[in-house]
Amino acid sequence: MNALRAIAVHCFTDILRSRILYSIVAYAAVVMLVAVLAGEWTLGEEVRLVTDLGLGAMLLFGLLLVLTRGAETISREVERKTVRVMLARPIERWHFVVGSYLGMAMVLLLLVAALLAVLVVALLPMGGSPSWTLAVASWGVFLELLMVAAVALLASNLSSPVLATLLTLLVVFAGHLATGLRAWMDGGADIEHLSPAERELAAAYQAGPLNVGLRLGYYVLPIVAHVNFKTEVANALPVPVMRLILGTAYALVYSGIMVLVATAVFRRRDVS
Amino acid sequence: MKTGMFAVRWAVVPVVLAVLLVTLDREATGWWPPRYTLERQVQASPAMLSMLSFGLRPLVADYLWIDAVQYFGHTLGRHVHDLVDGRIVERGLTGADVRVASRVFHLLIKRLLAVDPLFVRPPMLGAMFLMDPHADPALGMDILQTGARKNPGSWQLRLWNGFYSYALLRDKETARRELMAATACPGCPSYVADVRLLLETAPDTVLARVFWSRAYGEARTEEERVYLQQRLDELDEGIGGFGLEHRHEHEHHDHDEAHVAPVR
Amino acid sequence: MVTFEDVKKTYPGGLERRAVRALNGITFTVEPGEVVAYVGPNGAGKTTSINILLGLLRPSSGRVTVGGHLPTEASTRARIGYLPERPYFYEQLSAVEFLRLCGKLSGLEARRIAQRTDELLDRLALSEARHRRLRHFSRGMLQRIGLAQALLHDPDLLVLDEPMSGLDPIGRQLVREMLGEAKTRGKTVLYSSHILADAELVADRAAVLVGGELKALASLGELRAVSGDRLELVLGPTPRVTREEIAQRWPEGRAVGNDWALSVDEGSLQLIITQAISRGARIVQVLRPQAPLEETLIRLMRQSTEKGGNA
Ligand SMILES: Nc1ncnc2c1ncn2[C@@H]1O[C@H](COP(=O)(O)OP(=O)(O)OP(=O)(O)O)[C@@H](O)[C@H]1O
Ligand SMILES: [Mg+2]
């Protein structure tokens, strides 16, 4: 346990040192700028716009961090050979994998919390009262980032940093797309709004293999929609507690499985 | 001293570049500042937009809302001051232009609703703008109904839908039902119940005055207040009950619904 | 203490890489309390076998045990101090932070870590730089901090991959001293080195690895004896003959001051002396040199590669 904590803390400080602070400043700048301009544009929806944008930017900055640092957790250490001094010590290999992940998770939690604080500060003078839903939505962003980080961890275990970044991005995008596709094609979206080409695609989907593929993908991909509470915040609606609990459980289980697979892969690996 | 010069030299580069790009772009495409034309080429369908939104559907809806507001501001909401026979007159769009602009604006709001059906303000304000005697109340009614159908939990949409159903379409049954439903929605203020009672008993002018002044009190932006003030002024001047119906009657026959329907 | 049992390692090939057989079945044992120098030419497989010993690599077949346990068990590694071949450490950490991390991973208490850190940094002349980031360390300083982390938890077995590389003479002297100390305290040491003069000074035995095979594992005395059948004959110039003329006749020798030294085997000594005298040269000296380990090993390596080439 001590070793696990030491590695997690090491990874945590390691990532913190890589100028993550700048991204918080950049975030604050974006949010403040929009907050100043928003009134002009939105006819009374500036609180909503700043909230949506704030959450979107939170996700973006988190993703940037995960894609740049998370997707190279393992491969970078192996390539730079820094991992040798760790693994030569009396720790298990899974300590290293899980510790790296926990370090990343701690950074993400800190980042999301910090950005949420900035967002609340930006919203206050606009008359936006900080609501629980905003905190819940930020928690959702954190959970999403957690899942992406788990995917990135596995990817970084399988390939080089650049490839791992691409792979992670692809998987995350597919995860987003899967929800939209399914809703769209299962008729969740208004058919009247589909273009002819899209209607054809929907028909093809309902006919066969795409359908099966998507359903399969639903179990493999991170279905981040389960932890997406942004619509609720935007429209000042409450998030059902059950949805929150189930979403959280889903994200944790998914991430857990990914980390587990990453551990199994890393256990068999030659690092020299 | 040295670093100062260095900074200046490097600051010049982006400035020159920006000026150059803006000039070129204005020549080529005219996207800066945005040049709003009446016609709109709409590319991605809302289904596609929300699918590609990376889970940020509300943000995409915000963008569509800003875009719609901008469009409105440059077309229907735009009043040009002109000098005619030595007098200053205010001129907006006229005739066919109004119809085109109304339909495009209506389309923009419908697209938005397909992306985020729970967004209350666009159908509410959008309807309000289209209800303006200078625009197209039938289309306003349409987005209000669409909005209320997609977001049945919103008391605002129910209230406005009910109110306009009565004021515009003289459909007392729908109005009663919608106001009833509105009072059952979470967060509904108590005056809605009063409006419902007034609907049964009071003359139009009283109902209208209560409704408009309540709405005025809740208005968040200058644009809303201007519109509502106009309604209240009309009441003061004794024009009609709601300041809408004559316009609607007049418009109704030369406006066929099929025109509105094929919206993507 | 350390046992290699027919360890083979093949690095798997890929699309555009060929598989590399790095170890071809090596078997040897390092006894407790012994200092063994691991020598061999570049690419012989020293680092590969050391990495297997640490559990960083898996052998393709065979096995390595430390005190009877597999290195893949964490508890086995608790007894090993390891210096990697190239000292790539977390460069954003300071010396002290790095050692603290290492100590924690070895399960040491904070106070013990602090104490050992002070001792080792002092010993390795890094006290000045204790709060400097490793990024700003010179090559030799990194080597020193690598040694510090290897020694931090006072392990029973030290596995050092080229501990002398990058060090200045004082540093090398220091390492020799530390190895000597470790030996007197009953620690086992396995270290690879290309600097055989150092190996001669500290090691009990040397394991010679060439081309993934163990060529010799013997005490240094035994290794030197292998080279015993050659003699050195030193010829000097006289008024009758200059050194250049001597050198022309026996070009395979080398100049020693004014004289010319030849390496000859015992059988031909008599003949060459006779020839030299008849040409007017002076016999300065005939001696049986204690061949330096370096020469012995070079010969061992050459033999093997030639054999390997013929086979
Ligand atoms: N990761 C790897 N993949 C493929 N081949 C490798 C790998 N690492 C080492 N080799 C090959 O294995 C052989 C042994 O290498 P190793 O590093 O063990 O040699 P060494 O004895 O330590 O050499 P040196 O004295 O130069 O350090 C070499 O032919 C090398 O090219
Ligand atoms: Mg080596």
Image: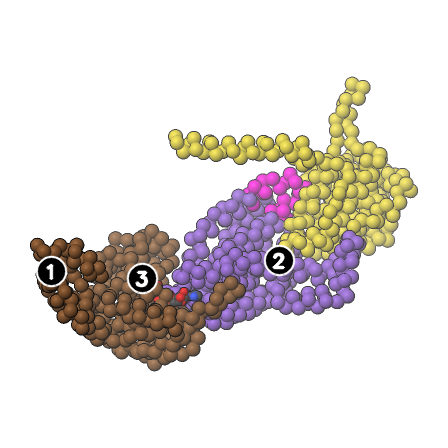
Chain colours: A purple, B yellow, C brown
Badge 3 marks a residue whose secondary structure is: helix
Q: Secondary structure at mark 1?
A: loop
Residue nearest the viewer, comparing B170 with B51:
B51
Please report whichever mark, 3 or 1, sits nearer to the chain's N-terminal start: 3
Identity of the residue furthest to the bottom in this view: C68
Cα distance between the residues tagged 2 and 3: 43 Å
Q: Chain ID for label 2?
A: A
Secondary structure that dominates the magenta span: helix
Q: Are marks 2 and 3 in contact (CB under 8 Å)?
A: no
Q: Residue furthest top?
A: B86
Look at mark 2 in the image and give the residue it sits on: A173
Give amino acid for label 3.
Gly
Q: Is disc 1's CB within 8 Å of ligand 1? A: no
Observer able to see residue A146: no
Label 3 crowding class (10 Å Cα cut-off): few <14, some 14-19, many 20+?
A: many
Q: Using the image as rendered, state which of residue C309 and residue C26 is in the foreground.
A: C309
Residue A40 in the magenta stretch? The answer is: yes
- From the image, state whether disc 2 or disc 1 is nearer to you: 1
Find the magenta span and give its range.
A31-51
Q: Chain of mark 3?
A: C
Amino acid tagged 2: Phe
Location of residue C266 (image quadrant) = bottom left
Image height check: is A68 above or below B105? below
> Relative to C288, is B20 above or below?
above
Spot occupied by residue C111 in the image (x, y as percentages of width and height): 29, 65
